[in-house]
Image: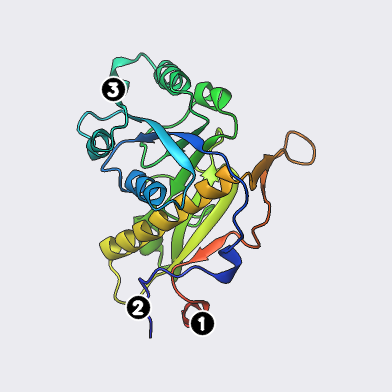
Amino acid sequence: MTSPAASTMAPSMVSSKRSTHTVRIGVLLSGSGTNFQAILDAIARKQLDASVCVVISNVTSAGGLERAKAAGIPAIVLDHRRYGNRKDFDAAVAEVLVGHNVEYVVLAGFMRVITSVMLDAFPMRIVNIHPALLPAFAGLNAQSQAFSYGVKLSGCTVHFVDAGTDTGPIIAQAVVPVLSSDDDESLRQRILQAEHRLLPTVLQWIAEGRVTAKPGPKGTERARVVLEGVEGAFVYDLPMQELEQF
């Protein structure tokens, strides 16, 4: 039987590639930057039509900065502690992103709450990767929340960012079963592997113009995501016949 950690995408995930443009991405991160590295790797494999224009971190020691420098990408530190409030910090971040002609902003382990300043500068163009199946287990330590709760299925979510905490319209999710042999850390690592596959996939959909965020029916209700030419919005971390055993 195939290992549950094997990378297998559901057939509904597959869609024929169509004309794209190279989407200009700005990455915000606070840590090691493994999701950022997954983006770079997908670009190198020509599986993602994107260019990372700039990487910004609020943490001087963030490992993702070194990844950016190694790839020849501008790596900029903006220490949030040097700003009077969150909006002032976001204004500085937005200024850098706009200065690098960024089209979409990717939060790849960025441990800061986004304010209206950023949302207004990049409306429905800020994408976040969250290590849980939203709307369950929003906020910090989502993997630990899921493990402690005792769920049988966990995973990750890529969504557009809105004014709430992990409440923005969902683009796609990946399901990761919680195995009887899992502990908190092993589940965390297996979800991270799923993140590394899901995020570049969604960014490629964006590059191909397949992802649209539309307002709610009354204009003031929660926005929803429309996927064009993609049959489903789930990527499974193992074959469906194995998933059914959990």
**Does the image show residue 222?**
no
Q: Residues within 10 Å of mark 1 (few under 14, many from 20)?
A: few
Q: Residue furthest left?
A: 61
Residue 48 in the image: state x and y as whole percent. 47, 48
Q: CA distance from mark 1 to mark 2?
A: 12 Å
Q: Are marks 1 and 2 in contact (CB under 8 Å)?
A: no
Q: In the picture provided, is 45 more to the left or to the right than 82?
A: right
Q: In the picture provided, is 96 more to the left or to the right than 62?
A: right
Q: Vertical placement of 235 versus 57: above or below?
A: below
Quadrant assignment, res 15: bottom right
Q: Vertical placement of 103 versus 90: above or below?
A: below
Residue 244 in the image: state x and y as whole percent. 51, 80
Lower position in the chain sequence, tag 3 or tag 1: 3
Mark 3 vs mark 1: give the one in front.
1
Q: CA distance from mark 2 to mark 3?
A: 42 Å
Please report the residue visible at 36 percent of the width from the left and 45 percent of the height from the top: 40
Q: Residue furthest bottom?
A: 1
Residue type (three-letter) at the residue carrying disc 3:
Asp
Q: In the picture provided, is 21 more to the left or to the right than 96?
A: right
Which residue matches tag 1? 241
Frontmost residue, 47 versus 81: 47
Disc number placed over residue 16 in the picture, else none:
none
User: For numbered disc 2, what is the local secondary structure?
Assistant: loop
Q: Residues within 10 Å of mark 3 (few under 14, many from 20)?
A: few
Disc number placed over residue 3 in the picture, else none:
2
Q: CA distance from mark 3 to mark 1?
A: 47 Å
Quadrant assignment, res 182: bottom left
Please report the residue visible at 59 percent of the width from the left and 59 percent of the height from the top: 233
Which residue matches tag 3? 79
**Does the image show residue 155?**
yes
Residue 125 in the image: state x and y as whole percent. 56, 34
